């Protein structure tokens, strides 16, 4: 079977994305859901270009957005594809087109041996954490661009009973965005895990080598090898220790990014509802700490995590977003929205509304440099019979590991070359949804975030408030109305306010 999706407006390898799956009988017999859709939207903004108040100009925008959603979950294949083409028209900006595309596939090519994973995405992202921040596709911001990601990962997995389990994996990834970002990487990894025992030492050996080609930098190689030993102290408590060696070849103005490292961790799971992992260690860049905790109640979820690692812009675009909130809602809303496809769409809409500034509230700003990133996130969700509430608080600090000169081409807004040497972003996001009756729903979302350059003292503050009401006209047709207020303040100037209103008719066929 051949699945073909045409994607226009990007580099050559994105003009035609073809996924060819040699599907065995078990895959062909899986249930397929294919839903074409159409969204018609009329909106008005009193400051569509996010300009200072003295230059603010009102703008009407008409949107016609056809889309398609495809999903299947069979014994050998899991595939999800969601594509929307946004066609926008306004008197001053003329015709514009945006694409939203998210696809993922997991194929069991040979049971217990060979597996294939693939994913692709197209989205609009803010380039810098400083300056105007685009919240809606109708806004015409010079600080946003289209990002395309592609990942393909064949893997060999097998459990040699009585000895160890094997995972050999190859990853081919790319992150591209016009001329701003062109990064391709290949990664090979091998992992051996000893057979788990409940009353003795367990072990895990991992070897990893990654080669990265950035269009603006010399090729770089990242290598890592580590051995982990763990021991179950009790049924609910275990400890582990890791030692390893890493060698990285990216450009840096400090010591060579290589050396041995170690860490120790504790894992505590007193019940299926509570899970806590904490770690402490040391790498070539200093002491490191980690925390990953979650607590579930019948209607409430709490998560708290903290991490420290060397990362990059393209690495963050390829990272997997946390799914605890969506998984929790998918179970809770089963009786409220029985159809799984409709439920998934409702969950996506709620999460998008409650996270106006992004999944973490902090911008993964564009850079060709590597950063030491320290990030913590606290999130809670409550889902009642009539109302659902969410709250998220996060902070991300980045310290550049190489010279800012290589980022000069990215500074199309702010011109200070040292602006992103050391940054800290903090955000608070809250969302709520009320069921007024069986067909109507009221949503309210509020977000505020601060981006601060610790290098030159610049501080930008962004806030947004959105009120929306949705009415289900039929099982396949929804009507919604939205009110939006956003504000940007900076000690470097460029302050603005923006108010928007829109009406949307969404149809599925």
Image (tube, rainbow, N blue to C red):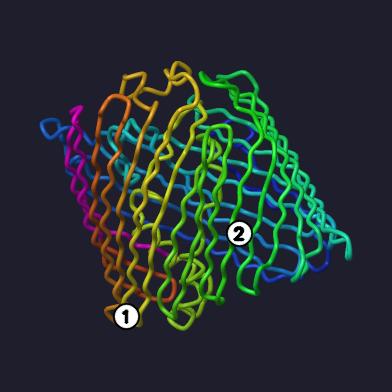
Question: As rendered, which of 148 and 300 lies closer to the eye?
Answer: 300
Q: On the image, numbered disc 2 is attached to which residue? A: 80
Mark 2, residues whose alpha carbon is within 10 Å: few (<14), some, or many (≥20)? Answer: some
Whether residues under marks 2 and 1 lie with C-beta atoms below 8 angstroms apart, the answer is no
- The residue depicted at 48 percent of the width and 18 percent of the height is 406
Q: Is residue 489 visible?
A: yes
Mark 1, residues whose alpha carbon is within 10 Å: few (<14), some, or many (≥20)? Answer: few
Please identify the dominant SS of the magenta region: strand
Q: Is residue 509 visible?
A: no
Number of numbered callouts drawn: 2
Image spot of residue 325 (x, y percent): 46, 65
Question: As rendered, which of 167 and 433 lies closer to the eye?
Answer: 167
Q: Name the mark nearer the viewer: 2 or 1.
A: 1
Name the image quarter holding residue 266.
Answer: bottom right
Image spot of residue 425 (x, y percent): 34, 41
List the single residue furthest toward the top: 405
In magenta segment, residue 505: yes
Q: On the image, numbered disc 1 is attached to which residue? A: 386
């Amino acid at each position: 079977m051949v699945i073909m999706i045409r994607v226009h407006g990007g580099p050559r390898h994105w003009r035609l994305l073809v996924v060819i799956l040699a599907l065995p009988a078990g895959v062909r017999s899986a249930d397929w859901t294919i839903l074409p859709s159409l969204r018609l939207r009329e909106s008005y903004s009193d400051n569509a270009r996010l300009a200072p108040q003295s230059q603010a100009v009102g703008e009407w925008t008409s949107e016609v957005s056809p889309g398609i959603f495809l999903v299947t979950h069979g014994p050998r294949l899991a595939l999800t594809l969601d594509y929307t083409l946004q066609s926008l028209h306004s008197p001053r900006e003329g015709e514009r087109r945006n694409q939203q595309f998210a696809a993922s596939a997991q194929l069991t090519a040979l049971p217990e041996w060979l597996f294939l994973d693939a994913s692709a995405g197209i989205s609009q992202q803010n380039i810098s954490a400083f300056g105007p921040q685009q919240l809606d596709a109708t806004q015409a911001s010079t600080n946003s661009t289209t990002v395309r990601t592609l990942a393909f990962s064949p893997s060999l997995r097998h459990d040699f009973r009585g000895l160890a389990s094997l995972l050999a994996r190859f990853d081919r990834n790319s992150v591209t965005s016009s001329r701003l970002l062109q990064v391709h990487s290949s990664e090979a990894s091998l992992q051996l895990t000893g057979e788990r025992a409940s009353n003795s030492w367990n072990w895990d050996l991992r070897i990893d080598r990654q080669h990265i080609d950035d269009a603006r930098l010399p090729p770089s190689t990242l290598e890592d090898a580590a051995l982990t030993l763990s021991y179950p102290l009790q049924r609910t408590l275990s400890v582990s220790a890791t030692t390893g060696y890493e060698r990285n070849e990216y450009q840096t103005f400090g010591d060579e990014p290589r050396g041995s490292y170690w860490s120790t961790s504790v894992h505590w799971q007193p019940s299926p509802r509570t899970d806590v992992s904490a770690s402490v260690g040391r790498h070539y860049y200093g002491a490191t700490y980690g925390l990953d905790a979650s607590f579930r109640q019948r209607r409430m979820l709490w998560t708290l995590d903290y991490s420290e690692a060397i990362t990059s812009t393209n690495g963050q675009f390829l990272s997997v977003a946390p799914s605890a909130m969506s998984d929790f809602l998918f179970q809770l809303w089963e009786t409220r929205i029985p159809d799984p496809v409709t439920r998934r769409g409702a969950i996506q809409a709620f999460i998008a509304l409650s996270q106006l500034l992004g999944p973490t509230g902090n911008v993964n700003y564009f850079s060709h440099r590597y950063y030491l990133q320290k990030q913590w996130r606290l999130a809670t969700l409550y889902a009642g019979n009539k109302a659902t509430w969410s709250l998220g608080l996060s902070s991300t600090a980045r310290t550049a590991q190489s010279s800012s000169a290589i980022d000069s081409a990215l500074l199309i807004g702010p011109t200070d070359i040292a602006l992103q040497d050391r940054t800290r972003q903090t955000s608070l996001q809250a969302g709520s949804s009320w069921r007024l009756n069986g067909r109507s729903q009221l949503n309210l979302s509020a977000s505020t975030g601060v981006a601060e350059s610790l290098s030159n003292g610049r501080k930008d503050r962004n806030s947004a408030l959105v009120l929306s009401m949705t009415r289900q006209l039929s099982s396949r047709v929804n009507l919604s109305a939205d009110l939006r207020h956003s504000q940007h303040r900076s000690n470097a100037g460029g302050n603005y306010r923006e108010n928007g209103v829109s009406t949307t008719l969404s149809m599925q066929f």
